[in-house]
Image (cartoon, rainbow, N blue to C red):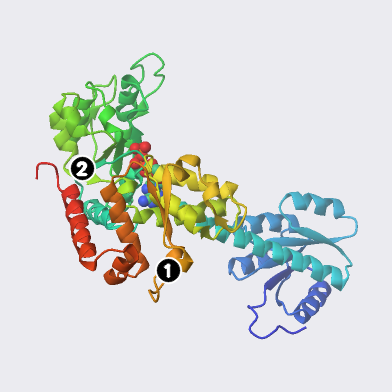
Amino acid sequence: MSEPAGAPVAPTLLVADDDPAVRQSLERMLTREGYAVVLAPDGPAALERLRAGGVDLVLSDLKMPGLTGLELLREVKAVSPDVDVILLTAFGTVEEAVKAMKDGAVDFLTKPFQRAQLIRIIRKALEHRELVQENRALQRRLDDLLREGHIIGASPAFRRMMTLVDQVANSSATVLIQGESGTGKELIARRIHDRSPRRQGPFVAVNCAALPEGLLESELFGYEKGAFTGAAGRKEGRFELADSGTLFLDEVADLSPVTQPKILRVLQEGEFERVGGTKTLRVDVRVVTATNQDLAGLVREKRFREDLYYRLNVITVTAPPLRERREDVAVLAQHFLRVYAAKNNRHLDGFTDEALACLEGYSWPGNVRELENVVERAVVLARGAAVEAGHLPDNVTQRAVVLEGPAPGERPAGDGPAAGERFFKIRIGASLAEIEQRVLEETLRLTGGNKTSAAKILGIDPKTVFRKLKQGEADDAAAERPPDG
Ligand SMILES: Nc1ncnc2c1ncn2[C@@H]1O[C@H](COP(=O)(O)OP(=O)(O)OP(=O)(O)O)[C@@H](O)[C@H]1O
Ligand SMILES: [Mg+2]
């Protein structure tokens, strides 16, 4: 049987048998089937050949001098776990062969065997190997997608933030990450570490809100044996564990007034003592913190130390809420769709226009985390190839008015793309000015930026379109300026 043109390289089979007649006959049969065959007269020779690489499957006699088939099997699994082994057994050693299956042999053949039987078993083993490899490749791709630090976004606000993040990563300055819940603060902290000169060192995260004061201190600074009841031995704290790396203090606004000065001291002197200890320890740690509270406000209310605030706040990165970067909703939704479709073994291509309009129109108080949860749920509920509005939770689809373009019959003549096919939702609770801006933006998107066509669709003067656009830009700029600036 000859290989079809353009077929992949023939699989290489390693045959180990001390009987020259068996080796010869196997070589003849397998070569005729199009396989590449290499021969080994005993176990040690087989292992040596295997280590040289390029072997896809091993066929080994069970009883050989030097190294039995079973021993060879174990060695193969240790050297190349991906390579399967088929054992060849003489009549009467079947029991041993069955045992070998438990040790990882894919199959066994009783000598003398028929050619057809041999070929079938080999094909099955090679298919199995291919499946395992495919599976592993898929798993790797999925891990890649889910890998911490994989941050998605394309909006100008997001890109501005990421530019800052990548700049500060290079320094060893203390960074305060501010932003509402679910905006990706932890991802940003990891990104800062992953892109910093300390990336080979550890990244250690501590949630300051998760533990009561005493426990948090022994968690951060460690403790000595007998420091308190139950301290049976000495324990290293997170500051020590993060030495030469990054310590991420999450929910830093929740640090108690007792713990705050201790953190300040590590930041200023790089020094601390374990709880119950007298020896002063030194560490080289970069501190990154995050909070969803208004830390400056807490300082004004004297609930957070001002000196610590300035130490933590050398550089502030602000993660914008999702509703202020709506352009990111579609990209993020698509990203999570891919991730959760793969996780749930679903084939989903995307969202219907209506579903996407709902997602883009919603206010996302829980930000990216909420979007992620909504998409995960939709993936589980969806039956067809796309996520529909019906698969989204009520709070995402309700409280919205559907604004549709003119129906197909009423389309302004000769005005490019089909006006009736674009629709989106507007959150009730938005101001009329906001709604007007959205309608303007969407209509312009529809006309590919052509203001005259947009004016025609909207039934207003082109000059009004220009004026309203200018007004929108001015409002945006005002919204981005700090209140006193
Ligand atoms: N830009 C992004 N790209 C991809 N995934 C994101 C992005 N932002 C956030 N996520 C995902 O959203 C979820 C919430 O993110 P994260 O835990 O970093 O938020 P957070 O700001 O720390 O929230 P909290 O204040 O509630 O702790 C995580 O699953 C994270 O992977
Ligand atoms: Mg967080």
Q: Residue 216 location, x and y as percent?
A: 33, 25
Residue at the image point whose x is 34% and y is 70% from the top: 448
Using a 10 Å C-alpha cutoff, classify the residue at mark 2 as few (fewer than 14 neighbours), some (14 to 19) or many (20 or more): many
Element assignment for label 1: loop
The answer, for residue 209, to whether it is visible in the render is yes
Where does the image place residue 91, in percent across and percent down from the top left? Answer: 90, 59
Q: Is residue 127 above or below residue 164?
A: below
Identify the amino acid type marked 2: Thr
Image position of 9 with respect to 128: above or below: below
Question: Disc 2 versus disc 1: distance between alpha carbons?
Answer: 57 Å
Closer to the camera, 85 or 217?
Answer: 217
Residue 40 position by quadrant = bottom right
Q: Is residue 151 visible?
A: no
Q: Is residue 289 left or right of 398 when viewed as pictured?
A: left
Front in this rendered view, residue 127 or 450:
450
Three-letter code for the amino acid on which mark 1 is drawn: Arg
Residue farthest to the left, as pictured: 485
Q: Which mark is residue 411?
A: 1
Q: Is residue 128 left or right of residue 296?
A: right
Q: Quick one: label 2 or label 1, which is nearer the N terminus?
A: 2
* Mark linked to residue 174: 2
Mark linked to residue 92: none
User: Where's residue 98, x and y in %?
Assistant: 81, 51
> Dot 1, crowdedness within 10 Å: few (<14), some or many (≥20)?
some
Marks 2 and 1 close (CB-CB < 8 Å): no
**x, y percent for residue 39:** 71, 73
In-image side of 464 versus 21 (left or right): left
Residue at 14% x, 44% y is 482
